[in-house]
Image (tube, rainbow, N blue to C red):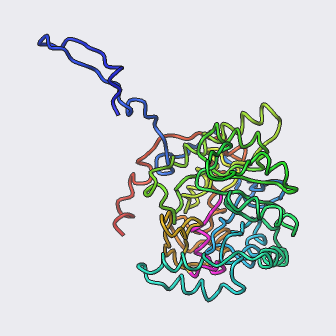
């Protein structure tokens, strides 16, 4: 859009008047995704065994900085237990099929097997069934029984209803998650959720997502967020960027929110973890997310490929079941390996999609980073050709 009030007149070589207009694109800032950057080696290296991947997430100690996304094709109570055994933490979708059906296995199989032209209607139908209190309480108990802390997620519209209920029934962490989160939501037709009041009222830590804006992230931290999730539209099953035209590439988004985290820590002394959510499939992308400033990563589709995942080789997003505006799609990711092999190896694939934590450990060691905090200090360079330079034989396979 051209602002003609800013037009400047000047004389051209022929004496004719020329006008210089100020365009919206003149102020576009460069932004970067995982494919645009690379990590630069420094002056020291480490033995991989000496690298420390432990993280503290909202008071929950983790052996690896991995969270499983609150997607029905990724997390059920059994999966949460498997991930906990490996050192991570899974989030259960409180508005998903696990809390609407006593035994969702048959429904999950139908969704996985449905033809592409039928699956959206099937998803809308599946999520029309009511959420049941007895199932919410049962799933929390089952997660505990599987050996995991109970981390649960819901959208802002459902948080006021289900947050206190989940806390009362033993959940240790609640995530308020939406496409775009802000500290100030305006609505004329209903009373919107006040995150500050909600976080203050809840007896358990409350994390929030998702955002890409550092000012919004800082405000959410000031309102009591236990963690802030970063990412709008980068997930493999998400179509937000195509449908709504919204999103910021993940390296820039994470870096911006990490800067807000560091400023908040300097002002208050409280460290609020930043979680890179979406867009990572390979170990190198996880390493870049940490280097960009993330404390942990949330994975969806990479974990949906595990034998233990309930989606049977498929995945779809939390926003998919909307009957009027689908913002996600069921994708076929395949079932390739156990969860342990995907996260800890040994890798049988050469594309970096298995032994994700081994790749992160090796990357940190090569860069001389012993801890996650050290990894956040390594040099990152603009290198859009780094993944294709000299790789013509690989691309031709």
Give the residue furthest to the left. Answer: 14
Q: Quadrant of residue 257?
A: top right
Residue at point 88% right, 56% down? Answer: 203
Q: Quadrant of the C terminus?
A: bottom left
Q: Position of residue 372 (x, y in %)?
A: 72, 49
Front position in the image: 50 or 257: 257
Magenta highlight range: 298-312
Q: Quadrant of residue 183?
A: top right
Residue 303 magenta-drawn? yes
Residue 241 magenta-drawn? no
Front position in the image: 38 or 362: 38
Asked whether residue 183 is in view, the answer is: yes
Front position in the image: 129 or 265: 129
Q: Quadrant of residue 256?
A: top right
Q: In the drawing, does residue 32 fall left or right of residue 291?
A: left
Q: Position of residue 97 (x, y in %)?
A: 66, 77
The answer to whether 85 is drawn above or below residue 368 in the figure is below
Most frequent secondary structure within the magenta stretch: loop
């Amino acid at each position: 859009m051209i602002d003609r009030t800013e037009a400047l007149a000047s004389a051209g070589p022929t004496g004719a008047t020329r006008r210089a207009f100020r365009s919206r694109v003149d102020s576009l800032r460069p932004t970067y995704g995982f494919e645009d950057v690379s990590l630069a080696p420094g002056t020291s290296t480490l033995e991989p065994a000496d690298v420390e991947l432990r993280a503290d997430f909202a008071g929950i100690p983790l052996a690896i900085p991995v969270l499983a996304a609150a997607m029905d094709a990724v997390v059920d109570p059994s999966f949460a237990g498997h991930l906990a055994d490996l050192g991570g933490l899974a989030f259960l979708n409180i508005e998903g099929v696990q809390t609407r059906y006593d035994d969702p296995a048959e429904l999950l199989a139908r969704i996985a097997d449905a033809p592409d032209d039928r699956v959206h209607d099937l998803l809308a139908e599946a999520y029309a069934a009511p959420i049941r209190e007895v199932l919410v309480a049962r799933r929390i108990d089952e997660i505990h029984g599987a050996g995991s802390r109970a981390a649960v997620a819901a959208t802002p519209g459902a948080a006021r209803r289900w947050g206190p209920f989940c806390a009362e029934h033993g959940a240790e962490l609640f995530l308020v998650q939406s496409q775009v989160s802000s500290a100030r939501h305006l609505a004329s037709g209903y009373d919107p959720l006040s995150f500050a009041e909600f976080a203050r009222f809840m007896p358990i830590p409350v994390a929030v997502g998702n955002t890409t804006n550092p000012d919004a992230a800082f405000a959410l931290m000031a309102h009591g967020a236990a963690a802030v999730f970063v990412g709008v539209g980068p997930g493999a099953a998400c179509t937000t960027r195509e449908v709504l035209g919204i999103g910021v590439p993940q390296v820039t988004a994470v870096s911006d929110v990490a800067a807000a985290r560091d400023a908040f820590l300097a002002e208050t002394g409280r460290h609020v973890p930043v979680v890179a959510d979406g867009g990572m499939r390979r170990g190198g992308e996880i390493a870049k997310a940490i280097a960009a400033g993330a404390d942990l990563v949330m994975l969806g589709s990479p974990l949906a490929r595990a034998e233990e995942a309930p989606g049977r080789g498929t995945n779809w997003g939390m926003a998919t079941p909307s009957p009027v505006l689908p913002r996600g799609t069921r994708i076929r990711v395949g079932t390739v390996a156990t969860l342990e092999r995907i996260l800890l190896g040994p890798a049988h694939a050469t594309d970096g999609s298995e032994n994700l934590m081994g790749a992160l450990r090796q990357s940190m060691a090569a860069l001389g980073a012993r801890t996650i905090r050290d990894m956040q200090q390594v040099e990152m360079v603009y290198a859009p050709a780094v993944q294709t330079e000299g790789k013509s034989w690989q691309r031709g396979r």
